[in-house]
Image (tube, rainbow, N blue to C red):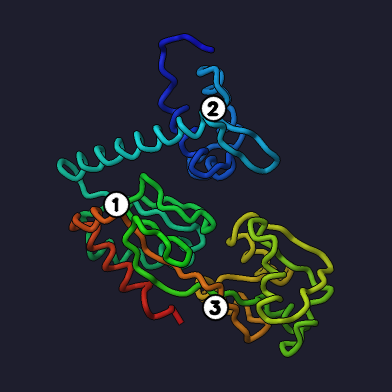
Amino acid sequence: MNTTSRLPSLRALRVFQVAGRHLSFKLAAAELCLSASAVSHQVRNLEEHLGIELFVRRTRALDFTGAGQKYFMFLDGMFSRLETETRQLAAEYGRNLIRLCVPPFFAGELLLPRLQSFHDLAPDTDIRLATQPSLMKIHPAEADLSILLGNGDWPALVTHRLFAHRLVVGCAPALAAGLDPSSFASLDGQTLIVHENRPDAWDNWARALDTPPPRAGKVIRCDSMSAVMQAAAQGLGVAIVSWPLARNRFDTGELVRVFAQEVATNEHFHLAHRPEESERADVAQLIDWIVAEFGTRELS
């Protein structure tokens, strides 16, 4: 046991807290703009400093040790309080700053192309935009507002339902010309593009439509929905894509639907925040803007 009285560095503690929230060095690295190896190194140095293992490292996954879970809960609360105090200080003495966390594909396809209209509406409000994968169904402690994908089961949060998440099959126009839009079997032998965080997507799609899963000629795996879309647009294969998030790609002709059917996921995108956040006038204004831009209309 390391008996030194010197505290660990704040940077190492922050890296551990973010890695613990994601239970992934890779996702923590993306949030912190570091490499996954740098995150792993920081955590290992912290463990050596403490003389305690904080994570059980498994293949492609992390789990807390008992000590790690306890330390994470303390640090997560500490950083949340630090963020709150910092935000209150900035609100009292500086420009308004709202921390908004959204899935990357939502940010790129919907939010950023429309964000200028909010800046025009609230020129004295700054937005700090962070991203987290849609599979992460938690509201980050450091966020004022977040966009979450799920069924609305966040009892500690105030949520505003925006639009339903659906799935369609798309590809480049040249590739679609050789497929039969009336036969799911025409996918057999095609290159299928797969989001590596959703490896069962094609099986689930086929099950929802009561059809056998397509027999892939080849599989291309991508680590983000943006990469999936890019691969499909380049004519590399056929992809399952999020609708209506990807609607602009179809409107421009970059992609076309292979089949008319849409598969419901039984999930909606929601705007979420802690109850006290709406007491801030600037946050309430952004809430109203997001709901007006993305709510109720189903973006169809």
Q: Which of marks 1 and 2 is nearer the N terminus?
A: 2
What residue appears at the point 82 percent right and 72 percent down from the top-left corner? Answer: 215
Q: Name the residue under label 2.
A: 42
| CA neighbours of label 2 inside 10 A, class few (<14), some (14 to 19), many (20+) | some
Q: In this view, does 48 lie to the left or right of 195?
A: left
Query: Among all residues in the image, which is located at the extreme bottom?
Result: 182
CB atoms at circles 3 and 1 under 8 Å apart? no
Name the element at disc 3. Answer: loop
What residue appears at the point 51 percent right and 28 percent down from the top-left corner? Answer: 67
Q: Which mark is residue 252?
A: 3
Q: Earlier in the sequence, mark 2 or mark 3?
A: 2
Q: Is residue 88 left or right of residue 172?
A: left
* Above or below: residue 172 compared with residue 28: below
Q: What's the residue type where badge 3 is placed?
A: Thr
CB atoms at circles 1 and 2 under 8 Å apart? no
Q: What's the residue type where badge 2 is placed?
A: Gln
What is the CA distance from the residue labelled 3 to the residue labelled 1? 32 Å
Query: Among all residues in the image, which is located at the extreme left?
Result: 92
